[in-house]
Image (cartoon, rainbow, N blue to C red):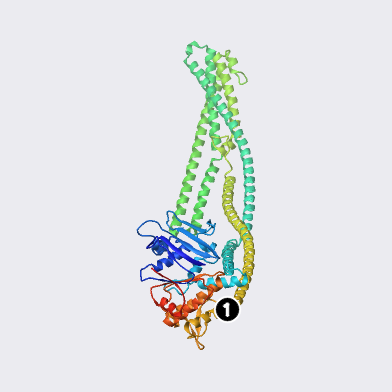
Amino acid sequence: MIITKLSPDDFGKFHDMELELKPGINVIYGQNESGKSTMHSFIKCMLFGAPRSRGRGAVKGDYALFEPKEGGGFSGRMTFEYKGRTYRINRNFSKENTSYSLTDLDTLEEIQRTGDDISEFIPLLTAQNYSNTISIGQMEAAPSPSFAGDMQTMLANMAMSGDKTISVIDAQNRLKKLKRQIEREIPDAEIRDINDRISVLRRETVGIEEIRSRAAAAEQEKAKLTREIDSLRARGDKVRSYEQQDRVRAAMLIQENNDIARQYSEKKKELMDIRESMEKTSATAMPDAEKKADAYYGREDKLREIEERTAVLKDMAQGAVLRAFAIALPVFAVAIIVYLFGTQFGLSEDLREYGALAIVAFSGLLLIILLIAAAGRKKKIRKLEHKGAKLEAQQKEFLKRNGIGSDDDPAVMFGTRSAARENILRIESELKTLKKRYDDLQVSLAPYIEKYGDTISIDAEPDADIQTDIEQLQKRRQEITREGEQLAWQLEMMTDKKNDIAKYEAELSELYAKRKEAYDKITAVSVGMDAIRESTAVIHGSFGRELNSRVSELFSRITDGSHGRLSVDENFRIKADDGKFFLYPENLSAGTVDQMYFAVRVSLCEMMYKEEMPLIFDDSFALYDDRRLWNTLFWLSRQDFYSQVIIFTCHRREEEALESIGVPFNYVEL
């Protein structure tokens, strides 16, 4: 490649300018601020463009540095020869109308392109390689930090693939990236997390069999209690049914009793009404026989009433004395118990004696009252019997006086019976019948009255003892139910956790398989990386020797053999061997370091590019002494590989050295 013309139309300080260049050595001289570095940057921008930087670095980017400050366009052209043909690059750098074209001037055909720089047309001529090899700016002899990796990649590519464009180092980097990616995919954290979860779940499910056993026992006890409750309810219902039937019978007897009492009351009232009516009737108006009959039956009525009252009092008096003693004796027994055992119940001696005495006095008083009541009833009985005997005597005297025998019917003997008397007799007969029925009914009703009282409901209440037992069993069943529900909840939670353990163990099995697969992949990738490293080491051994030989020969020519050979290690660190010690760049002068990097750059250019390429220097020899500058220029003038050398300088030394050597060169002054 030979650059023949630079035409910055509007670039930095240049406007509508053209600069002719020739094969061989070109010296472009200019004082400070004359635009040498601008022209140097113009070459780079024409080849690779001037992208706009962003952020803090924007003010230092090529676009910001070389955009015309006075307005107008921002463009340029560059003509060059490559492989025997002439081409021209046209660029517009303006952000409003950015454009790039490459034209074959021999055919005027525009070269089709996909990118925005020259690298797709001239292989390996990338902006990175350009800056690290063929272009050396002011104080920029040392390549960028990525230089070693790029060169190592190139050497490995050339040896292993025979093609500089196929990056073996990129392949190794891809393998490293793949290895890191696979390592990130190793589920160690997930495995630890799941193992931790399983451990926690196993601790939380300890005792699940005991919980299951307790839950089953609770269900069994609950079922047993339910059966007992049902049995008690059945028995209670049966008892209640019997009692309800008994109550119905009692209610029927009470109803019958009430009916008889009502009928008796009605008949009694009817009898009283008849007698009252008879009393109101004038005695003179009544026949004599009827008067006698009324007198007779009136005394009969009174006698019957006395007999009834006497019978009632005799019933009450019968056994009254025994009942009195039966009531008083238990009270007296209490007095004896208090007297004998009062101290055992916490009573003092005085309280025991006085208490026993008081109870004895009370029992005696009670006995006296009951005996007096019994004696009073006997006195009433005697009075009624005396009155009854007197009435009977009067009746006998009345019958005797009227000539009626004991076997005769007084009513018939009197010769008449009034309608009222007939009614009285009928009603009295009915009252006797009702009275007998009532008395008989009291015998049947007495047990029910004693059992249920005077008012009997046919609705039987549940048996209290059975109901108490049922309530206690229900309370226990509720407790067992709550306990069973709690155990069932615990069992459900533990069962869910057991299921979670099974699920996590299945996931864990998959993760272990995934981890093994990842480790197998890593092993395979590591084997590949080891193979590449071993191959690269072998390759670097062979290419390194060639590179070291070229660099050492050139450095020796430049320095007149002042230092031994140069060595570039596998990481492209440069050192000089003086036979005793290794001298590193930090141990040498700045000029010598520039010369070391110069030797490395030009040697690598020969190994990188298949075609002849230009070398561009921008005040790169400022730190060279005169002798080493003369040696360097002499060597450059004798090289066939470098089609063109472009030297930007603000000194006359390069011009004078070339003239002294007798080397022709193209001189341009800015």
The quadrant where residue 311 appears: top right
Residue 419 in percent (x, y) is at 56, 14
Residue 523 in which image quadrant: bottom right
Residue holding disc 1? 546
Residue type highlighted by circle 1: Glu
Looking at this rendering, what residue extends furthest in the bottom direction?
580
Q: Nearer the viewer, residue 325 or 92?
A: 92
Q: Position of residue 413 (x, y in %)?
A: 59, 15
- Of 162 and 349, which appears nearest the observer? 162
Q: Position of residue 362 (x, y in %)?
A: 46, 48
Tell me if residue 418 can be seen. Answer: no
Against 630, is 134 above or below?
Answer: above
Can residue 558 be seen at all in this image of the molecule? yes
Q: Secondary structure at mark 1?
A: helix
Say above or below: 68 vs 23.
above
| Left or right of residue 528, residue 615 in this image | left
Using the image as rendered, state which of residue 246 and residue 217 is in the foreground: 217
Task: Estimate how packed mark 1 is, as few (under 14), some (14 to 19) or many (20 or more) residues with alpha carbons within 10 Å.
Answer: some
In depth, the one of 625 and 341 nearer the eye is: 625
Estimate the x, y position of residue 233 in percent, counting from the top left. 62, 43
The vertical placement of 455 against 423, above or below, is below
Q: How many marks?
A: 1
Q: Quadrant of the C terminus?
A: bottom left
